[in-house]
Amino acid sequence: QVQLVESGGGLVQPGGSLRLSCVASGSISRISVMAWYRQVPGKERELVATITQYGTTNYANSVKDRFTISRDDAKKAVYLQMNSLEAEDTAVYHCKAAVLLSGRYTYLELWGQGTLVTVSS
């Protein structure tokens, strides 16, 4: 079974830090773009950060200079280091990856189930 599994969410005080992880499993031969999104109930899902297979990163203006996305291709993982957290960062964080399955020729878009981040004092 091919899937993405996130971890690392939790409750943190304003100004604190968290590191989210997302690991892909299954018969995957290659992963191209990986990304983190977040969603607050009643609002649209928001793109937080992306990283290509070449290491090029892009961030939403709201998290620039506070969040850092990185990846470890050997572990089929993507990470999101979140610093200086604010109450407005409270959301369910989802990872997404474009994966090439073994023996296939087209990329498949996978989503994780999400991990809740709550920033509150």
Image: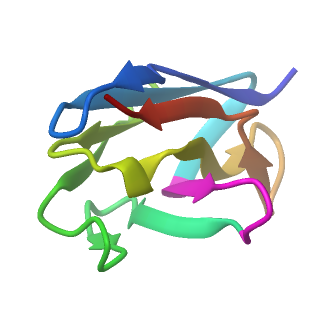
Q: Which residues are magenta?
A: 32-44
* Left or right of 9, for residue 40: right
66 drawn magenta: no
Return the x and y of residue 23 as percentages of the image width and height: 54, 25
Return the x and y of residue 49 as percentages of the image width and height: 40, 63
Seen in the picture, residue 67 relative to 16 is either above or below; the reply is below
Q: Residue at x 26, y 60 (%)?
A: 55
The part of the image, by quadrant, that contains residue 52 is: bottom left
Indicate the colouring scheme: rainbow
Which quadrant is home to the N terminus? top right
Return the x and y of residue 28 as percentages of the image width and height: 68, 34
Q: Residue at x 81, y 28 (%)?
A: 2
Residue nearest the viewer, comparing 7 with 119: 119
Return the x and y of residue 5 as percentages of the image width and height: 65, 24
Which quadrant is home to the C terminus? top left
**Residue 7 visible in the picture:** yes
**Residue 77 visible in the picture:** no
The part of the image, by quadrant, that contains residue 70 is: top left
Main SS of the magenta part reads strand
38 drawn magenta: yes
Q: Residue at x 74, y 22 (%)?
A: 26
- Tally the marks: 0
Q: Residue at x 26, y 42 (%)?
A: 82
Q: In the current view of this chain or complex, which residue is farthest to the front? A: 121
